[in-house]
Amino acid sequence: MSKRRILITGAGSGFGEGAAIGMAQKGHDVIATTHTSAQVTPLRENGKKLGLTNLRVEKLDILNQHDVTNAMRWDIDILFSNAGIGEAGPVSEIPLDLVRSNFETNVFAPLAFAQKVIRKFIDEKRPGKIVFTSSMGGLFTPAGFGCYCATKHALEAFAESLSDELRAFNIKIQTVNPGPYLTGFNETMAETAFHWLDDSKNFNKRADVQKAFDELLGKDSGRLDPKEMIDALVALVPDDNGKFRNVVPKAIEDLLKSLEEDAWKREI
């Protein structure tokens, strides 16, 4: 595989951080960007300790237009669009401002940034590739996570449309759909519901919501080793070939296909 120039958003932690280090170790030129300035120095220092002179770390908040304008100066072959947040809690009562905020970060800002990268590829008359981090939650929706899953369902739709629209320009689109890996993201997302749930106001009670989250996230099957996903990202993001949708691990892909089949039989 030839050396690629790869920009990663949301590389301050989790899959983004692991993939940035892993791809740099494979010899690719990586621009790893973090949401906050405070995340920049720790990742830079880690890169130095590992001897990764090809790992460049910058701040890029995709909601900050100054950051976005600066990022358009960078020469890249691949955008790994990984930045995202999660809001949890019963959809029947979740405050709509939180829903809007989740869509702004997970859908509108990534789409706006991708549009700029796409135009840059086209204006420069060269091929390119964009990989979006979706989720297993982009293909099904467990109770209590409807807001976050809705953003990933929307991202799936945009990615699928872009894949067809950009084929003539030799710009490739992929999604990655991680299963329930223990990066801390899912657990932190679950906690957001308790910032607004109030037993004196809400008919969804905190104890019931907590019990449902514990049942979903507390099992070993919901706490997989993230190294498996990171290794998959290191291999597929720089590759010119591969599937449009990439669910990891295979057991989750099989589960999602089964759930999709069941959805056609579901009754009210």
Image: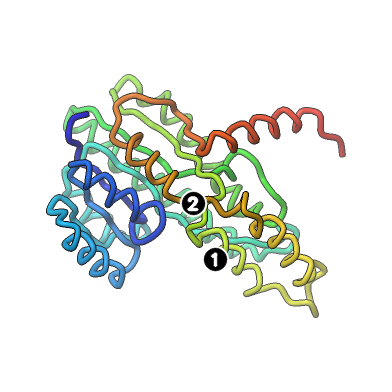
Give whichever of discs 2 and 1 has the lower sequence position: 1
Q: Which residue is drawn at 20% across and 33% down?
A: 123
Within 10 Å of disc 1 (Cα), the crowding (few <14, some 14-19, many 20+) is some
CA gap between label 2 and label 1 equals: 17 Å
Q: Position of residue 15 (x, y in %)?
A: 40, 52
Q: In this view, does 18 lie above or below 254?
A: below
| Quadrant holding the C terminus | top right
Within 10 Å of disc 2 (Cα), the crowding (few <14, some 14-19, many 20+) is few
* Label 1 element class: helix
The number of numbered discs placed on residues in the rendered structure image is: 2
Q: Which residue is drawn at 41% across and 57% down?
A: 14
Pick the front one: 101 or 226: 226
Q: Residue at x 17, y 35 (%)?
A: 3
Q: Residue 264 carries which label?
A: none
Pick the front one: 23 or 62: 23
Farthest residue, direction top: 168
Q: Which colour scheme is used?
A: rainbow
Q: Is residue 64 something that shows in the picture?
A: no
Looking at the rendered structure, the kind of residue marked 2 is Asp
What residue did someone put label 2 on? Answer: 225
Q: Are marks 2 and 1 in contact (CB under 8 Å)?
A: no
Q: In this view, does 150 lie above or below 186?
A: above
Q: Where is residue 187 in the image (x, y as percent from the top left)?
A: 57, 63
What residue did someone put label 1 on? Answer: 188
Q: Position of residue 23 (x, y in %)?
A: 26, 44
Q: Which residue is drawn at 60% across and 69% down?
A: 191
| Quadrant holding the N terminus | top left
Q: Position of residue 229 (x, y in %)?
A: 44, 44
Which of discs 2 and 1 lies nearer the camera? The answer is: 2
Farthest residue, direction bottom: 200
Q: Is residue 34 something that shows in the picture?
A: yes
